[in-house]
Amino acid sequence: MSHNPDTETFAGNPSNRRRGSAYFNTLLARPESPALLFLILLLVVFSVTTNGFFSASNFLGILEQVVIIAIVGLAVNQVILSAEIDVSVGSVLAVCAFIYGNIAMAYGGNLLPLFAALAVGTAIGFLNGVLSTYGRVPSIITTLGALFIYRGLILLLAGAQVLNVPKSSRVLGLSDLAGIPVSVIVLTVLTAAFYWVSNNTNWGRNIYAVGGNESGANTLGLPAYRTRLIAFVLSGSACGLAAAVFLGQIGQLQATAGTSFELRVITAVVLGGTSIRGGRGSVFSPIVGALLVGVILNAMTLNRVPGTMELFVLGVLILLSVSSEGLRQRYLEKKI
């Protein structure tokens, strides 16, 4: 009976099987890995089954659509990692966009409107953070209240007004460098900055410690309140930056702008692998999750699925993501 040495080497050797299993477990342990694998699968499936999906222009369109979700997601990711939540980002984005649009119409340019939007977003994030940390109001209550307050404020001030932003103030949404949209470049730089901070600063490391085990963090003397406060401030600031990109892309602003935006952001973060309980996740989780959301919504549009199905789909994705996270954790714990 003949023997195949290659088969014995790769399939029959127990050490190689163990090594392969170890590689698989290591890959699975990465927070964003399941979402990334799912994303690749969907790209293949939709490329084969959906007319117009597999094209450079469509992929670029998806990138531009998810940039705003990803920018805010990078900051909201830090809030969730710290075991808090921010559901106000849709309303905060609308407020910042209202500020940006009015100043752009009055004075033109990009820097002054951007600075104003960043300042307002940062101030709102700071207020949310103070109430949720030092004020000890549960963050879901604080930010839910902020969601209604700021949305009501915009509806009161803007009403049926439609702002048409001058083209000269739409650089972050319209311009490109060597064919790459400026918004995508901004997202890339922002992701690199969050990655560096996460790996090279005390605050970046404290986020995981505070979110994963607050009592242990307190025992070690880590500044839990300050750590979470900074995360909320970043969330507000990100809304200010995203507002400039948002208005740059669409050129018009209505009072209803950003409605349900918070659902897309939280879906992206959780779908990308960040645990809703805090303490576990990756800087890349919101990026992968945003791309996944963008690909699914784009395929729905190309297949003429009614837009009214969007909330249903996002809700299903959140439930599936949270459920699969629990299954993955139990599987990994058995392998330890």
Image (spheres, rainbow, N blue to C red):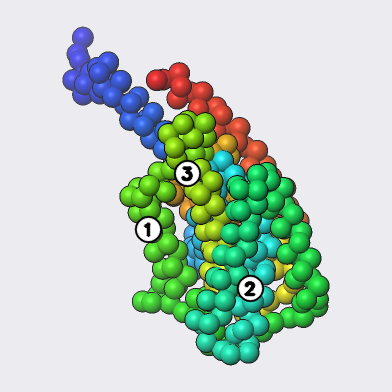
Residue 159 relative to residue 311: left or right: right
Q: Which residue is farthest bottom? A: 107
Q: Quadrant of residue 146?
A: bottom right
- Identify the residue shown where x is 43% and y is 68%: 186
- Identify the residue shown where x is 65% and y is 52%: 131
In the rendered structure, find residue 97 and report the number of the disc placed on it.
2
- Identify the residue shown where x is 57% and y is 76%: 116
For marks 3 and 2, give the CA distance.
33 Å
Q: Position of residue 307 (x, y in %)?
A: 72, 59
- Identify the residue shown where x is 41% and y is 38%: 30
Q: Secondary structure at mark 3?
A: loop
In the rendered structure, find residue 233 and report the number of the disc placed on it.
none
Q: Nearer the viewer, residue 19 or 235?
A: 235
Q: Residue at label 3?
A: 223
Tag in front: 1 or 3: 3
Kindly identify the amino acid type of the residue bearing the numbered disc 1.
Answer: Ala
Q: Position of residue 207 (x, y in %)?
A: 47, 44
For marks 1 and 3, give the CA distance.
25 Å
In the rendered structure, find residue 192 and report the number of the disc placed on it.
1
Q: Secondary structure at mark 1?
A: helix
Kindly identify the amino acid type of the residue bearing the numbered disc 2.
Answer: Ala
Q: Quadrant of residue 243?
A: bottom right
Q: Which residue is farthest top? A: 1
On the question of residue 238 being in view, the answer is yes
- Badge 3 crowding class, 10 Å Cα cut-off, few under 14, some 14 to 19, many 20 or more, is some
Kindly identify the amino acid type of the residue bearing the numbered disc 3.
Answer: Pro
Q: Position of residue 16 (x, y in %)?
A: 26, 22
Residue 98 relative to residue 208: left or right: right
Q: Secondary structure at mark 2?
A: helix
Q: Position of residue 326 (x, y in %)?
A: 56, 29
